[in-house]
Image (spheres, grey):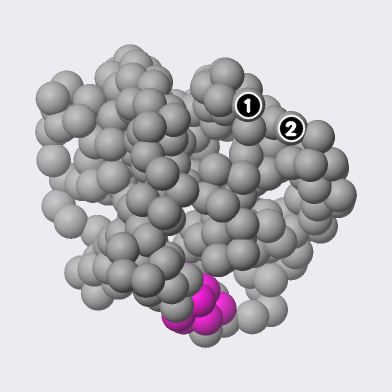
């Protein structure tokens, strides 16, 4: 969760994807996701306040409804699939995330593409599904958002507010599935002080430590967690 908060502070955004896969090595995936969601909602408050109203309105009219539909589909999968299947699926998502980050790092930003209702809806729905399962909604959404080449502030605001809204929407199905029991709530409360510490640490690290080195550490950690989850879910 500290790594997630560091990513929320703007340093090595890939750090945000490590929390649930790492926790899922020792906890059931739904429990790890529930503990993380409360903390993500707390971290999102500052982001929503900072970027509110600066998003691309045309994109938000497409991706927010698509993301909400994806949250509903992801909740159905959480309620239907066995813990082992969810773990294996999380492993696939995690390794896909690693591959996506490596691809983006090597390829750089692609040329600008036009606004697309169909592509935006499909990618945001996929983002809602993976976000609900493991708070790993970034790769599907960025397949659409990166090629759009929006102005930097607009791009950041659109992403931050989209995931902030989606995280709060996820509270409904998580509650309906009974994932906010006392054990998970008390664990989240115990970890809550890491949120402001990590955000401020992320801001501090930007000027003092190479993001490339930190990013590589996070990617290797995600790779190890993803392989372990696939082994537990499909091969063990």
Instruction: Residue 13: tell me if it is visible.
Output: no
Instruction: Residue 107: tell me if it is visible.
Output: yes
Q: Is residue 169 above or below residue 205?
A: above
Q: Please state the horizontal and vertical placement of residue 219, each as a whole percent of the image.
A: 44, 74
Whether residue 216 appears in magenta in the rendering, the answer is: yes
Toward which corner of the image does residue 226 lie, by quadrant? bottom left
Toward which corner of the image does residue 175 lie, by quadrant? top right
Q: Say the numbered circle drawn on residue 181.
A: 2
Q: Please state the horizontal and vertical placement of residue 122, each as a whole percent of the image.
A: 20, 30
Q: Residue at x 44, y 30 (%)?
A: 79
Whether residue 102 appears in magenta in the rendering, the answer is: no
> Are dots 2 and 1 in contact, CB under 8 Å?
yes
Q: Is residue 165 above or below residue 34?
A: above
Q: Residue at x 29, y 29 (%)?
A: 125
Toward which corner of the image does residue 207 lie, by quadrant? bottom right
Q: Please state the horizontal and vertical placement of residue 46, each as a whole percent of the image.
A: 70, 36
Q: Is residue 115 left or right of residue 96?
A: left
Predominant SS of the magenta segment: helix
Q: Secondary structure at mark 2?
A: loop
Q: Residue at x 55, y 66 (%)?
A: 25
Q: Say the numbered circle drawn on residue 178.
A: 1
Question: In the rendered structure, which segment of residues is drawn in magenta?
Answer: 214-222
Image quarter (top left, top right, bottom left or bottom right) of the N terminus = bottom right
């Amino acid at each position: 969760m500290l790594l997630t908060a560091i990513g929320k502070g703007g340093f090595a955004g890939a750090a945000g994807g490590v929390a649930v896969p790492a926790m899922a090595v020792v906890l059931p995936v739904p429990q790890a996701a529930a503990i993380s969601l409360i903390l993500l909602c707390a971290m999102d408050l500052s982001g929503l306040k900072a970027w509110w109203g600066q998003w691309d309105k045309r994109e938000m009219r497409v991706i927010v409804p698509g993301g909400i539909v994806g949250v509903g589909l992801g909740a159905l999968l959480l309620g239907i699939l066995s813990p082992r299947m969810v773990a294996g699926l999380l492993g696939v998502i995690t390794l896909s995330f690693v591959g996506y980050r490596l691809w983006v790092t090597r390829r750089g930003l692609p040329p600008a593409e036009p606004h697309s209702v169909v592509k935006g809806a499909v990618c945001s729905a996929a983002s809602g599904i993976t976000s609900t399962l493991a708070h790993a909604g970034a790769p599907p959404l960025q397949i659409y958002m990166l090629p759009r080449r929006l102005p930097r502030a607009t791009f950041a605001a659109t992403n931050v507010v989209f995931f902030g809204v989606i995280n709060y929407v996820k509270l409904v199905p998580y509650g309906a599935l009974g994932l906010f029991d006392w054990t998970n709530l008390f664990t989240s409360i115990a970890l809550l002080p890491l949120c402001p510490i990590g955000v401020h640490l992320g801001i501090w690290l930007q000027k003092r430590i190479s993001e490339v080195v930190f990013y590589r550490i996070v990617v290797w950690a995600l790779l190890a967690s993803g392989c372990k989850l696939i082994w537990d879910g499909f091969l063990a």
